[in-house]
Image (tube, rainbow, N blue to C red):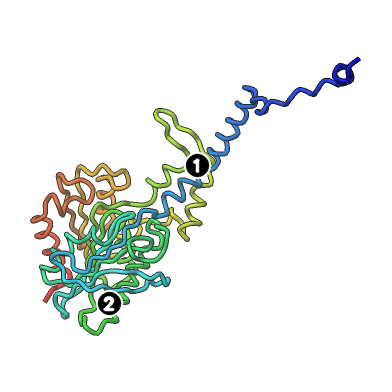
């Protein structure tokens, strides 16, 4: 027998090669994996929504030094809890009162330029600033009115300390989220004599009503109930305690003007909320229901009437001289 044939006879069959890919998951395994993934996502939805609500990931830093019609100075000051804030100060008359303007949810000071121009032209000093977590100011979170009143109180303290401003009386103008902020700040500071709140909100109920469930088309998916507690932890306060309606009655005998567009479609600032706030306010109080303009749109849609009404209000209650 040849050596070649002998080798063939003595050889053992080789083991079959393993396939390059492992066997695919069964449909049962795939279903269980997908179900587990959906449960994990469902469990984290409240956390994702909480961080999305509070964190301002798309903040716009303002580098303008001279917005048209406002000869501003860049200023910095601190909120009463130490957060550093950036803003613009335009001094029309050192003997005149200063009006502080507060923007809305995740906005910045540029939102308030149209109103600031009107007030500056009318003879008032104006301070526009970026709220905490917005624009060029410190902080990463929007506290939904829980701590932003401390920004306003810090602005008042800063202005009182300026030697080039002899008048230590102040007015406030706030839009949207800022409208509630100015009402709550004015309730704490007696040197604030007049407050304008545009597109107002009553309390945090509209926010808390969204928590605990997720609407998917016609379906409502219940969620784990930890979202309110997590939001409170993130904002450093209680969301349910941010209630402008509890502050507005404390302003009297200081004046308040509420502005509301009848066609405001924002669910947090419906016209019905303005009616509740106006009923709760003491005298002197005024309201202006604008037929059109939408959310915070009165100053644009009805510019001349806005200027006339707001200046007349401040001229009476801040006693511009």
| Residue 34 in view | yes
Q: Is residue 236 left or right of residue 153?
A: right
Q: Kindly state the secondary structure of the residue where label 1 is placed.
A: helix
Q: Is residue 39 left or right of residue 277?
A: right
Hey, which quadrant is residue 157 in on the image?
A: bottom left
In the rendered picture of this protein, how many numbered marks are placed on residues?
2
Q: Residue furthest toward the top?
A: 1
Quarter of the image with the C terminus is bottom left
Q: Which residue is mark 1?
A: 45
Taking the spot 24% from the left edge, 60% from the top edge, the residue there is 110
In terms of sequence position, does the residue under pointer 2 or pointer 1 come before the other? 1
Q: CA distance from mark 2 to mark 1?
A: 43 Å
Above or below, comparing residue 265 to residue 159 in the picture: above
- Between 190 and 92, the one lying in front of the other is 92
x%, y% of residue 177? 31, 55
x%, y% of residue 291? 14, 44
Taking the spot 40% from the left edge, 28% from the top edge, the residue there is 218
Q: Kindly state the secondary structure of the residue where label 2 is placed.
A: helix
Hey, which quadrant is residue 315 in on the image?
A: bottom left
> Where residue 159 is drawn, which disc sits there?
2
> Where residue 288 is drawn, which disc sits there?
none
Label 2 crowd bin: few (<14), some (14–19), many (20+), radius 10 Å: many
- Between 173 and 77, the one lying in front of the other is 77
């Amino acid at each position: 027998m040849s050596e070649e044939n002998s080798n063939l006879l003595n050889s053992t069959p080789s083991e079959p090669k393993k396939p390059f890919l492992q066997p695919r998951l069964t449909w049962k395994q795939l279903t269980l994996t997908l179900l587990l993934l959906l449960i994990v996502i469902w469990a984290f939805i409240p956390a994702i929504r909480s961080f999305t609500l509070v964190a301002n990931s798309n903040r716009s830093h303002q580098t303008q030094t001279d917005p048209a019609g406002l000869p501003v100075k860049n200023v910095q000051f601190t909120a009463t809890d130490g957060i550093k804030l950036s803003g613009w100060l335009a001094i029309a008359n050192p003997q005149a009162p200063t009006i502080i303007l507060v923007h809305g949810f995740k906005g910045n000071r540029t939102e308030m330029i149209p109103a600031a121009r009107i007030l500056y032209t009318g003879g008032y000093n104006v301070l526009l600033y970026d709220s905490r977590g917005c624009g060029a100011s410190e902080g990463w979170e929007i506290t939904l009115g829980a701590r932003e009143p401390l920004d306003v109180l810090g602005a008042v303290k800063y202005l009182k300390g300026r030697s080039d401003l002899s008048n230590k009386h102040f007015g406030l103008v706030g839009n949207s989220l800022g409208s509630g902020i100015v009402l709550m700040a004015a309730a704490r500071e007696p040197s604030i004599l007049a407050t304008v709140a545009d597109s107002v909100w009553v309390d945090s109920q509209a926010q808390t009503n969204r928590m605990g469930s997720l609407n998917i088309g016609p379906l409502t998916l219940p969620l784990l109930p930890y979202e309110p507690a997590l939001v409170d932890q993130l904002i450093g306060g209680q969301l349910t305690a941010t209630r402008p309606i509890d502050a507005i009655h404390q302003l009297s005998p200081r004046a308040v003007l509420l502005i509301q567009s009848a066609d405001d479609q924002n669910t947090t600032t419906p016209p019905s909320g303005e009616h509740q706030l106006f009923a709760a306010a003491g005298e002197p109080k005024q309201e202006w229901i604008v037929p059109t303009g939408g959310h915070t749109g009165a100053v644009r849609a009805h510019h001349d009437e806005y200027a006339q009404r707001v200046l007349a209000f401040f001229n009476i209650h801040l006693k511009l001289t």
